[in-house]
Amino acid sequence: MAITPGGSLNSVPASQRQTLSSNYIDFTAQGTAGWAQQYLPDLMEKEAEVFGNRTISGFLAQVGAEEAMSADQVIWSEQGRLHLSYKGTVNTGTGALSITHDIDDVALTTTHGIRRNDIVIVATAEGTIKCLVTDGFVGTADIVTVKPYEVENIDDSSTFSTAAAAACTVLVIGSEWAKGVNGQGSAASDEAKAVKPTHTSFTNKPIIMKDYYEISGSDASQIGWVEISGEDGQSGYLWYLKAEGDTRARFTDYLEMTMMEAVKGVDVANDVVEDLLGSGGATHGTEGLFAAVETRGNITSGITGVNAATDLAEFDAILAEFDNQGAIEENMMFVNRATALAMDDMLASMNSYGAGGTSYGVFDNSEDMALNLGFSGFRRGSYDFYKSDMKYLNDKSTRGGINARNTVSPVRGVVIPAGVSSVYDQALGKNLKRPFLHVRYRASQMEDRKLKTWITGSVGGNVTSDLDAMQVNYLSERCLITQGANNFMMMK
């Protein structure tokens, strides 16, 4: 029987006590730093937090609430304006007033509410004049006839020219009737009809969001500890659960990012999305915060950081728009870094006392104290504003990176009214008070889909399938309700 020795059978280690290279581990052969490295590497177990707190969730928790729902959609109604004010054109010679839009420049889809014997203010670019409605009323055409109190026709007033037609705004301020006239006139005539309040209905639908994390049974049994400090304040040693924690945190952020950014789908031909989500493009998607404000709210480019005086004038224009809407006194401003600094500069410029126009410190105006040029709240006119940085708009891996690419119309911040709004809930059949911004999630006595988490697979003590892995599943079904979007302001 022939024996073939291995190529290095007797070479490592040497059979005699001699100083040979074969008696030692060759670090060079191991791909390390060579003989200069005489010891094993120093392993740092703690994970370096180079991005700080990486999550962006928490915004909706500050400004809204959460409420369960059991239907496929949410329907709510918002009240219209109380007073009758319209836009249109007026013939200054005949007094014929054509009503085309409401005061918010929305084309009329129903008849107006102006009736005979109403007192109105008619305003054009040339001036205003008080008139009495002499003909035309609710239920007829969009034409009413007005005659001024002080002259025969509007163009007879020295304020107005003889132009036949002029764009105008008309406001009903009351009415005047002759003696002996019963009620609003003949009950059979149109002028006796009541002015009925109008409201607008809106809908939104929840969407289903999913994610999952998976690790094989072999990897789960090969423990490699990592010392971590989680975004929620937890700390300790983890191995594969570290990746699961990141997946959970990312999914939680997705819940908030979707509620802010999502849009409703539309029906289009050859829609590939319909193949994935089912028929009917209009049933896809949901209306997020940004989409609701862009559609039904206000958009401004104010507070651009040009200079303090300009920014203050732009901010006053925002206040004027709020006066046109609900005039809600308390508002929260969530802005990116550039807008926050522009506001700080604007407010600091208004405070000019101290040596050389500098305000020292935050206590007793002492120059030994640190200079504080950051403002978290301020009051302008009759409005209170509370300013806060919005990490979602600053982080490069979220909206901050999108804004850096889209410099034409980046989202720089959003102004959200504080408090609650009164709306009519069609499902309950009564008025309810709810936050202007709140999340609706699907839930019932048997199933809660606010944020579901479950584990499947063979890893761990509870074996649920023959899959040689652990799968952690995440699911939520929710939508965002933006009520009174006319009181919101987006900065772009």
Image (spheres, rainbow, N blue to C red):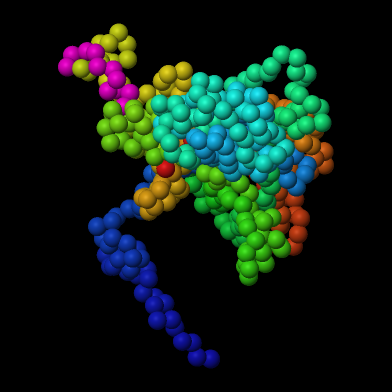
Q: Is residue 240 left or right of residue 426?
A: left
Instruction: Give the magenta-colored segment's residue range.
Output: 345-356
Instruction: Identify the residue at horizontal 69%, vertical 16% (top origin).
Output: 178
Nearest the camera: 466 or 224?
A: 466
In the rendered image, residue 279, in percent from the top left (x then y), is placed at 71, 63
Q: Is residue 5 left or right of residue 89?
A: left
Q: Residue furthest left?
A: 356
On the question of residue 110 being in view, the answer is yes
In the rendered image, residue 247, in percent from the top left (x then y), is placed at 56, 50
Image quarter of the C terminus: top left
* In the depicted structure, whether residue 391 falls above or below residue 158: below
Q: Residue furthest top?
A: 364
- How many callouts does the rendering have? 0
* In the depicted structure, whether residue 108 falls above or below residue 134: below
In the rendered image, residue 236, in percent from the top left (x then y), is placed at 52, 39
**Residue 282 lies in quadrant:** bottom right
Nearest the camera: 277 or 300?
A: 300
Q: Is residue 352 magenta?
A: yes
Q: Is residue 453 magenta?
A: no
In the rendered image, residue 240, in percent from the top left (x then y), is placed at 56, 51
* In the depicted structure, whether residue 358 falls above or below residue 417: above
Instruction: Identify the residue at horizontal 57%, vertical 37% (top origin).
Output: 96
Instruction: Identify the residue at horizontal 52%, vertical 33% (top origin).
Output: 169
On the question of residue 472 being in view, the answer is no
Instruction: Identify the residue at horizontal 59%, vertical 25% (top origin).
Output: 132
Nearest the camera: 223 or 120?
A: 120
